[in-house]
Structures are given as C-alpha cells and as structure tokens.
Image (tube, rainbow, N blue to C red):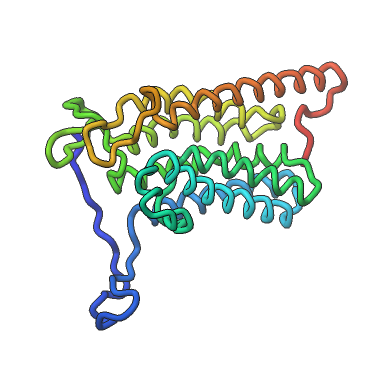
C-alpha cells in the first residue's frame, strides 16, 4: 500500500511576526498550490512553444489564454459550489464570489469553453486553431494539477487494500487524484509526440474528450460515499459523471469533423491537413 504522506507547507513568513494583525496566519507555499501553479506554467509554456513553431501571433495567444484561464477558474468555482456544495451555498450565498475557495474540474472545462467562445466573439477570430494549441498541451498540465490533488489527499476513494491504495488514517483508500494523474500521463506523452507533425484540426480536442470521459466516469464509481464531504449523487451518479456523457458526445462529434476535414484536404490537394492559425 502507498504511504499516506503529508508534505508540509514551506513557511516564508511566520504568523507570529504579524502580532495578531492581518493576515493572521503564515505566509507559505502550499504543496497543492505549488503543483497547480507548476501545471499552469507547463501548460502555458507548451502552448507558447507550439505557437511559435507555427508562427502564430503571440498577442493573440496571450489574450486567448487569459480568457480561457479566467473563464476556467470562474466556471470551476461556480460549478463546485452549485453542484458539490449546494447546502453550503444556500447557507452562505457570498461563497460564490470567493473564487479561491473550491474548484471543480468539469466546471473549469465549461468555463474555459465559454471563455474561448467569448474571446472569439470579441476578437472576431476563429478559435479552432487556438483550441488545438491548448488541447495538445492540456494533459501535461492536468497531470501536475492532479498530482497536487494527490499530495493534498482531497479526493479520497473507497476503502481498499490493493497495492495502489493509499494508507489513509482510518484505513487504506483509493486516492482519486493519484489515479487520475496516472491515467492522464499516457495521454500527455502521446499528445506531445503527436504534435510534432501537423494533424487534422480537432484531433487533439476530440481525442482528449473521448479519452477522459470514460476514464473519469469509471473512476467516479470508486469515490468515497461514507465521508461528510463525499460528492453528492444525482440519480446515483456524480455531477462529473453526468458531465462525462456530454463530454463523450462532444469528443465523438469533434473527431468526426476532424476526419471529414482530413479527407477533404487529402482529396483536394497535397497541402497539410491543418493550416497555420
């Protein structure tokens, strides 16, 4: 069984130096936040590297990333409180504006998609190529983000005595953050290899959705249901599992469109199937 390791915070300024004044607690680097920040840094770095290789205007890339990131964090927070903490939201409606307090992966996906649409509408530019830049880079960033969840142990699963279970206090459990990070790693590696050559527009987004949806749907059955903060069920499924149904449909639709565009490009000329953005 995997040991239950709690990585301590790296305290930069201890709370005692504030003499009870604001902020009243240590200023520290938290392992979870550090890994999430590393994931964002890796993702942005991969997007920028690929954009430069394709000679995409960097100002457009930067503005697109800003809209997607802001939309993702806003959507992740709203979705988390509305579907995972509805009772707490009713008791404290102002929690909806405390964006730093709680995030949901599927809410982040929805928010990022809305941010992408809003950017396209405002800039009058097609977002398809930018979506591919982000999609081909996202699994690598997601891997580090889910490692942050594993370090924080904030997604406990069912009791288990398997070799891949974690020795939580009170008994071994599956760690859903760790399992999802391990499931994401192969996709991240494959994407980094695939993007060395031009691919049909929509391939990365379609593959990402069709891969992640069934994996997440299956993993959510192993989430703990005996804890006070266990994810609520809606007709026996988590909110993320319902989201997986739509995500799979989106992925299959996008892949069908990518296949059609690739066939048309192959029949029409010898030009690359994916043109520069």
Residue 125 rendering spot, x and y as whole percentages: 79, 45
**Residue 72 vertical position relative to residue 162 in the rendered view, above or below:** below
Which residue is found at the position 55% from the left and 47% from the top?
72
Q: Quadrant of the C terminus?
A: top right
**Residue 150 vertical position relative to residue 45 in the rendered view, above or below:** above
**Residue 250 vertical position relative to residue 34 in the rendered view, above or below:** above
* Pick the front one: 269 or 219: 219
Going by the image, does 199 lie left or right of 14? right
Going by the image, does 127 lie left or right of 168? right
Which residue is found at the position 59% from the left and 22% from the top?
249
Residue 127 rendering spot, x and y as whole percentages: 73, 41
Is residue 202 visible in this depiction of the protein?
yes
Which residue is found at the position 73% from the left and 44% from the top?
54
Q: Quadrant of residue 104?
A: top left
Residue 176 rendering spot, x and y as whole percentages: 32, 34
Q: Quadrant of the N terminus?
A: top left
Residue 166 rendering spot, x and y as whole percentages: 21, 36
């Amino acid at each position: 069984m995997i040991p239950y390791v709690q990585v301590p915070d790296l305290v930069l300024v201890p709370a005692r130096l504030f003499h009870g004044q604001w902020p009243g607690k240590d200023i520290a680097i938290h392992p979870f936040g550090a890994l999430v920040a590393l994931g964002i840094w890796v993702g942005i770095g991969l997007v920028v590297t690929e954009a430069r290789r394709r000679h995409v205007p960097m100002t457009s890339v930067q503005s697109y990333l800003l809209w997607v990131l802001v939309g993702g964090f806003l959507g992740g927070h709203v979705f988390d409180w509305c579907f995972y903490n509805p009772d707490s939201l009713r008791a404290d409606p102002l929690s909806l504006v405390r964006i730093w307090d709680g995030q949901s992966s599927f809410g982040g996906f929805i928010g990022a998609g809305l941010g992408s649409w809003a950017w396209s509408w405002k800039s009058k530019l097609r977002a398809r190529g930018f979506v591919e830049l982000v999609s081909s880079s996202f699994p690598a960033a997601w891997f580090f983000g889910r490692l942050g969840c594993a370090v924080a142990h904030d997604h406990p699963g069912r009791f288990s005595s398997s070799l891949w279970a974690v020795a939580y206090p009170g008994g071994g459990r599956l760690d859903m953050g760790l399992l999802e990070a391990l499931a994401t790693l192969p996709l991240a590696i494959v994407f980094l290899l695939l993007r060395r050559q031009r691919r049909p527009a929509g391939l990365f987004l379609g593959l990402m959705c069709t891969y992640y949806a069934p994996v997440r749907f299956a993993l959510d059955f192993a989430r703990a249901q005996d804890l006070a903060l266990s994810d609520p069920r809606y007709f026996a499924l988590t909110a993320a599992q319902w989201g997986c149904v739509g995500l799979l449909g989106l992925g299959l639709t996008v892949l069908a469109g990518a296949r059609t565009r690739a066939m048309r490009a192959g029949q029409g000329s010898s030009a690359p199937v994916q043109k520069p953005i």
